[in-house]
Amino acid sequence: MANIFERNRAELEDLCKRRFFFRQGSEIYGGVSGFYTYGPPGCALKTNIINLWRRHFIIEERLMEIEDTNIMPHPVLKASGHVDRFSDFLVRDVSDDKKFYRADKLLEDVMEDKLKEKGLAAEKVKEYTLVRNQADAYSQEEISEIFRKYDIRAPESGNKLTEPEPFNLMFPTPIGPSGLIPGYLRPETAQGIFLNYKFCLEQNQNRLPFGVAQVGKSFRNEIAPRQGLTRQREFTQAEIEWFVKPTAKQLKKFEAVSSEQMMLFSSDLQLAGKSAETITIGEAVKSGMVNNETLGYFMARTGLFLTSIGVKPEHLRFRQHLPTEMAHYACDCWDAEIETCYGWLECVGIADRSCFDLNAHAKAAKVDLAFREKLDQPIEMEVLRLKKDAGVAMMKAFKKSGRVVKEWVEKLPQEELKALIDEATKDGKAVRTVEVADDQTEECTFLPEHLVCETKKEKQSTVQFTPGVVEPSFGIDRILFSVLEHSFYVRPKDESDEEKQQKNVLRFSPNIAPYKMTILPQDQRVQRTDKYAELMQLMQSGAALCGHTCTVDDSSATLGKRYARNDEVGIPFACTVDFTSLEDSTVTLRERDSTEQIRLPAAEVAALLDQLCLRRTTWKDAQARYPARSAGYP
Amino acid sequence: MANIFERNRAELEDLCKRRFFFRQGSEIYGGVSGFYTYGPPGCALKTNIINLWRRHFIIEERLMEIEDTNIMPHPVLKASGHVDRFSDFLVRDVSDDKKFYRADKLLEDVMEDKLKEKGLAAEKVKEYTLVRNQADAYSQEEISEIFRKYDIRAPESGNKLTEPEPFNLMFPTPIGPSGLIPGYLRPETAQGIFLNYKFCLEQNQNRLPFGVAQVGKSFRNEIAPRQGLTRQREFTQAEIEWFVKPTAKQLKKFEAVSSEQMMLFSSDLQLAGKSAETITIGEAVKSGMVNNETLGYFMARTGLFLTSIGVKPEHLRFRQHLPTEMAHYACDCWDAEIETCYGWLECVGIADRSCFDLNAHAKAAKVDLAFREKLDQPIEMEVLRLKKDAGVAMMKAFKKSGRVVKEWVEKLPQEELKALIDEATKDGKAVRTVEVADDQTEECTFLPEHLVCETKKEKQSTVQFTPGVVEPSFGIDRILFSVLEHSFYVRPKDESDEEKQQKNVLRFSPNIAPYKMTILPQDQRVQRTDKYAELMQLMQSGAALCGHTCTVDDSSATLGKRYARNDEVGIPFACTVDFTSLEDSTVTLRERDSTEQIRLPAAEVAALLDQLCLRRTTWKDAQARYPARSAGYP
């Protein structure tokens, strides 16, 4: 059965277009799919969501924020794995290679259709469901096999399809004349943070843990974008990388959130075919369902953020990745999913990615990204050290490069040294590639006599490791879309009302509302007075000083119509200047959801608005402070 | 002689790298020129500048803000002229085509060198200066001619150079699989606004004037980027397009800024070899030096914005474009130039671009972007209307397409109809291309008998025109760079001081400072108490609630060293928790520039900080309110 968001979908889509929350990109040129333009209320809403995100995470958690580039050079994305693995499979109509389909999505659709067949055997239902759910996890060989098995055809023409081919989702672009440096638009903001981990660590006085965030555009050249704002080729991410000692993921401030109730959908519950359960994050970490306190802390903070901007708690759940879904390096991963007209939509991913990315970049860029922790008490360790004679033997054997090769061996991490000795002992020799000068390597053949070591006891005052990382990754556009859906409602019709039209309302809380207040002259006679201009200026400048946007609606429509028009874009307060205002400088302030009104001096409006938007006072308090004005007035 | 910013340059560059205001992009991979990464203080500074820009322009001027895409399809940038004309000339070393130079910059350098020759004749000085100043304005033929004339060679090898070739500065990227839709990264944010003019006009209830803004990344594939942050391949723009009736550029609110003093460098003054003069913007508009009030208003508001974030007024001037510099469609153009280590740097361009862009997109996208103004009083006009017989003749002549062609003629604007008749009358026929169906055109030959018209008197209740546009365009990175240079100073050494090092300070005003306050425990004994944690939490949460960032500096360095470290990143206030604090919950607050200190209850710190940052109170007032603490303490 369609959920409430599906039922409201057409209405809300119409509103978003008509009031220009967003429209397809380059619309006057016919539009390009996968690209969207935010119009004035949509852009203001997005800016407000990002500002609140910054306050909730960057300021309150004292994260460092950086701004890296959108265009990144090839080696960075080669190292991160995106050049080789960031692909979807594509199939083409054999008789028209410009007709193409994303293989996994096509497979899902075909299975959906099969599942709708009447009188299906239970075993078939199971089979089709499994294939549908795994569609995006198949390898090239597997998906190719599956396509053959079900004889999947091009949906429009019924033609056969080509073999699935991987299509890289990154947008390539050449840097510099002649494209000497191949580049890509970043597919995620996270990589920019890993590139700068070392410099951020310095700013943190070389201490762990610490968090770095980045807010910005990411780009994915989707094969066949659909579902509007939720799957764009260009979208906004807000990502945090929390760098932490892998064995120290407990967090002191976890206590402050441990009693937060959350709807959790663990992989056990999913595999058992049960539904999500609501428990406290404290219990979830304690029971081991959530891997560690750091992960649990960010899950709780994410929940608090989402509900603070208008996501309804009963439509928010955290779903754990199944063991088969998880990246090989990840140790636990939860998605914050929000229920929308498209079903449960992944809006935030919170993953414990271990040290995969830092290691990959350290290796590719040949930089040392290890963390050295000073020990309070030095520890005594047994270590292998090259004997003097062996060193001399090496100096001779490798001639010109002798000294460099010897130093290379001396600097090898203990495990690698041990492996080298073992190999040489076993096989009589061991070959390694050694960098003997900048950009110059040599194949070195080590004999056992080059590697004779003695065991020494040494005091170590530091330990060395690559930090692990917990990554909360927010899809801002999906969150915005969910907030729109959760804020929308149709106001029950009032029979006595002069307006017969249906009235749509966006119930934005004042902190994210695109515009905080609209100023309405009662009619054009009021509007033409100098006093009106003076009062408007007073309220508007006052609000602007506090950073709040006001609109003015001085059209000739009736007040009722203008209220409706402003309710529709979610403006929480409407301030009417009428004939009485011209005499005593008081105005009427109306609250959107209750439609109740108070009367107060124009000079006090900006300050009250500021208090209401910052949630330092409530509308109820304002009603207690100022006299009511009946709804019929004026 | 080097200006003060040039003299401070090395020092500031070192600071910016060391404290990670910014670094070259992908630095651990060796870096890519023209790309920069903002680190934590740089990113916070940029965010604060953008937020203040939004408040100053979008909120206070009630502009609409939109967010369009970074990737734009080919037709959009073809229409805007960027595909054909957004190029620089490139020359290559004949024996190494991977060695290339931007022709105009190379020419400038060569002329600079010639000008340094001793005992140069006055006439040569004039010649070389002229060539240098015009270097970026030559056509392909002209620059080719000039390169031959001076026999300009590759600077490193002394080899000959290839003929100058145009190199398009846009980054191309294919959209969708098979790159079916060619796209580019936008070279400016402005085009996104023109694309959405029509939808924004609707939101403004079809009224003029109104302004639309966009803040975001732009991309230019510079041939040889240099001068650091000021010429990046990826940079942030904040652009406004103010749409206005071309004959109504007077602005009521101009009065509010008319007495602003501004340093103006008109084209007359430049051509006469004089220096800039300081006059009020009111006088400048009145005398006609600045074309109109709308342009003057935005110049004044730009000046106010720049000085409010720390640009020194004595190093800020507005330079008018010379008639030879201006785009053919522009009617006046002024650059806000800020003096930096690179000389006077163009940071904001404020141009009256007339209706060029809207006309170009209307034509290319075949959409109607004309504005229809209702007249208060209908006017009677003489118009040409096709006679019935002529219509019948056309229907016959053009057969199948007869009706469409006839309607096309009837809808022609009056001037075009007149031109068609004149041509047919003179030459016996006139040929026009008519769109007879979607994507299908026909060459139509009109004979005089198809075009017989009569003159009628008709009442018109609307006039139709394409809006003109005034465009203030801000280069955010250049502004940030200027603010850094204008804020930097070296604190005079104090002999009695325990620290012997030179002390650099960034004198950011609290509104743009990356971090507003640092919290310092006196030493590690204080730091280990619960009371310290409690006080720190109190002040930090209080500040965070108001949206202000605090840092904590609990390293073991001396207080003096820690003050110096925080002055260097421009933190305006430092709050010390000492042994007295543990007893009576009062703390010491130090102001960065005066280094003076007051003592106040920890519970009052956040509120005072908020007032100071919002400029609602001053440090002087705070000093009057709270007792001083002598600098030597504790």
Image: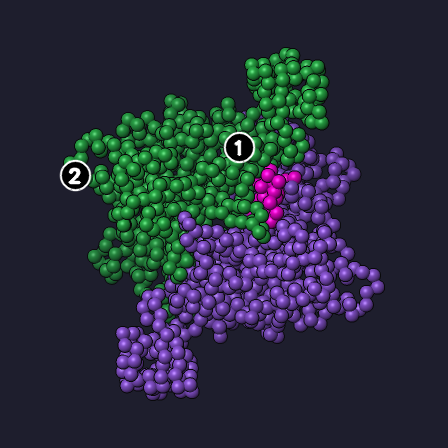
Chain colours: A purple, B green
The residue positioned 53% from the left and 42% from the top of the image is: B74
Using the rendered view, name the quadrant where residue A139 is placed. bottom right
**Image coordinates for residue A40, horizontal then vertical, percent:** 57, 41
Crowding near the residue tagged with mark 1, few <14, some 14–19, many ≥20 C-alpha atoms within 10 Å: some
Q: Residue B118 carries which label?
A: 2
Magenta stretch containing residue A28, yes or no?
yes
Q: Which of marks 2 and 1 is nearer the N terminus?
A: 2
Q: What residue type is labelled 2?
A: Lys
Magenta stretch containing residue B183, yes or no?
no
In the image, the segment drawn in magenta is A18-46
**What is the C-alpha distance between the residues marked 2 and 1?**
51 Å
Which is nearer the eye, A144 or B511? A144
Secondary structure at numbered mark 2: loop
**Image coordinates for residue B184, horizontal then vertical, percent:** 51, 45
Asked if A417 appears above or below B235 in the picture, the reply is: below
Using the rendered view, name the quadrant where residue B436 is placed. top right
The residue positioned 62% from the left and 15% from the top of the image is: B448
The residue positioned 65% from the left and 70% from the top of the image is: A267
Residue A524 visible somewhere in the drawing? yes
- Image quadrant holding the N terminus of chain A, namely bottom right
Q: Is residue B148 left or right of residue A626?
A: left
Asked if A305 appears above or below B49 in the picture, the reply is: below
- Image quadrant holding the C terminus of chain A, namely top right
**Image coordinates for residue A165, horizontal then vertical, percent:** 60, 60
User: In the orientation shown, which residue stands out farthest toward the right?
Assistant: A119
Q: Which amino acid does label 1 sit on?
A: Ala
Q: Name the residue under label 1.
A: B360
- Give the chain of mark 1: B
